[in-house]
Each structure stands twice: as structure tokens, then as C-alpha cells.
Amino acid sequence: MANSADFDVIIPAAGRGGRFGGDKLSREVGGLSILAHSVMAFIHRLDVARVVVVRDPGEPLPLTAALASHPKLHRCGGGALRAESVLMGLRSLQGSPAPFIAIHDAARPAVSAALIDR
């Protein structure tokens, strides 16, 4: 793990889930949404300063109340393409980004701490 608060994390979550047939990020696994699992992989880490979920403002964030109100959690709107969403997430960090930025696909909820550390 890196030094304290070395990372901002951008989680693109603005996709339409067309191949899946709907909003897969709201689907629950083990009592939590897929998006919640992805956010939880990063939000409590000491080396993470902010977690930015990039999701259209009209779409709900399927998170627990504790996650939704966490001081590290931020939200911004997304673009039509994943690359545009990542760019919008990067722009939301303007002013004081952490030294490093990690990007994690919201639809990959089973990422391990060991993989994140690598």
C-alpha cells in the first residue's frame, strides 16, 4: 500500500448496460449492489483520498446510506463513451488531485485488496 492518501479513484459507472439488459450496477450480490461492492473496495483504504463515481445525474447511486454520505465519495456526470466518462472524472478532480489516479470499472466488484495494492 502506498503512503497516506496518495490516490484518487475514478469509478466509471455511466454505462447503459445494453449487453446485460439493464442497469447491472444496481443488481444485488450478497445484499449490496454491484456498485456498492466496487466503491467499498476503495473507500476505506488509507491510501485513497477520494472516490469519484461517474454516473449520470438522473441515475440513482445504488449505495447504502453510509456509503452515499461518506466524505471521500464524490459524484460527477458521465459521457457517452467510457473514455469521456473517465475524462469527466479527471476534470472533477481539478484543483487538488492526489499524486496518483486509479481508474476502476464499476462492474468489477470482486477486486481484491492484494490486486489493488499491486
Image: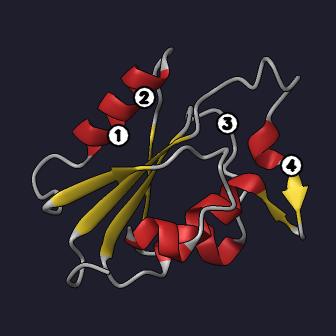
What's the amino acid at mark 4? Arg
Residue located at (10% from left, 52% from top): 95
> Mark 3 or mark 2: which is in front?
2
What is the C-alpha distance between the residues marked 2 and 4?
21 Å
Q: Which residue is mark 2?
A: 85
Kindly identify the amino acid type of the residue bearing the numbered disc 1. Answer: Gly
Query: What is the x, y in percent for residue 106?
Result: 60, 46
Q: Are marks 4 and 1 in contact (CB under 8 Å)?
A: no
What is the crowding at mark 1: few (fewer than 14 residues within 10 Å), some, or many (at least 20)? many
The residue at which mark 1 appears reads as 89
The residue carrying mark 3 is 59
Q: Position of residue 58 (x, y in %)?
A: 63, 32
Identify the residue shown where x is 26% and y is 53%. 101
Crowdedness near tag 3: few (<14), some (14–19) or many (≥20) residues, C-alpha within 10 Å: few
Labels 4, 3: front one: 4
Q: Can residue 58 be spotted in the picture?
A: yes
* Distance in Å between CA atoms under marks 3 and 2: 14 Å
Kindly report the distance in space between the C-alpha atoms of the residues bearing marks 4 and 3: 14 Å
**Secondary structure beneath disc 3?**
loop
Q: Is there a contact, CB below 8 Å, between mark 4 and mark 3?
A: no
The answer to whether residue 69 shows anywhere in this view is no
Which callout, 3 or 1, points at the residue further toward the start of the chain? 3
Q: Position of residue 107 (x, y in %)?
A: 67, 44
What label does residue 97 carry, if any?
Answer: none
